[in-house]
Amino acid sequence: MDKAAVYRDLKAEIESVVAGETSVTARYATASCILAQAFRPRFFWTGFYVVDPLKDRELVVGPYQGTLGCLRIPFGKGVCGHVAATEEAIIVPDVHTFPGHIACDSATNSEIVLPVFGADGKLAAVLDIDSTEPDAFDDADREGLSAICEILLVA
């Protein structure tokens, strides 16, 4: 099965499991688990950094699967902070060359980060996926993960 088909199946699975669930935390936790299991070992760390409601220019670690994550990331700092500031997905083939990269785990070599928007259109979180493999992500990952991000927040 090609990667795009796998993502379509995973989106349907996540959508089915979270249908009717009103907790954003539960929705994020479910997506993190299903994605991490489906793409292990390529997905070394899979999770969400949520916009802190008390500090709106800061991300705080949310539900994830993997090793210890950074607790807080300011907008504009590192890959996740860059995505929070620009609200645009990014694929980083080699995190060691990304200016200001925050090494939450030194085993990470590549990363994909996508914005997650709330029903109000504002940034709610970022989905962060790290890999120990260099250049582990491509446009099929970006497209598949973007589609999954669109179904995660309740209206």
Image (tube, rainbow, N blue to C red):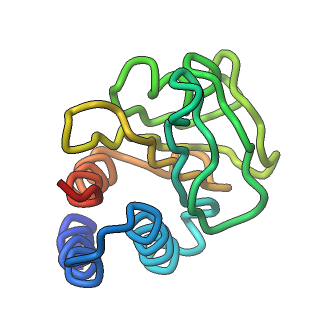
Q: Is residue 100 left or right of residue 147?
A: right
Residue drawn at x 25%, y 68% is: 7
Q: Nearer the viewer, residue 141 or 26?
A: 26
Residue drawn at x 82%, y 45% is: 106
Where in the figure is residue 57, as x and y percent of width and height? 54, 21
Where in the figure is residue 82, as x and y percent of width and height? 51, 22
Q: Height in image: 149 above or below 37?
A: above
Q: Residue lying farthest front?
A: 54
Where in the figure is residue 91, as x and y percent of width and height? 44, 36
Q: Quadrant of the N terminus?
A: bottom left
Q: Is residue 144 left or right of residue 99?
A: left
Q: Nearer the viewer, residue 24 or 133?
A: 24
Numbered marks: total:
0
Q: Is residue 51 left or right of residue 89?
A: right
| Quadrant in the rendering for residue 38 | bottom left
Residue drawn at x 69%, y 26% is: 101
Q: Height in image: 137 above or below 114?
A: below
Where in the figure is residue 141, as x and y percent of width and height? 33, 53
Q: Quadrant of the C terminus?
A: bottom left
Q: Residue lying farthest right?
A: 106
Q: Nearer the viewer, residue 144 or 24?
A: 24
Q: Height in image: 89 above or below 142?
A: above
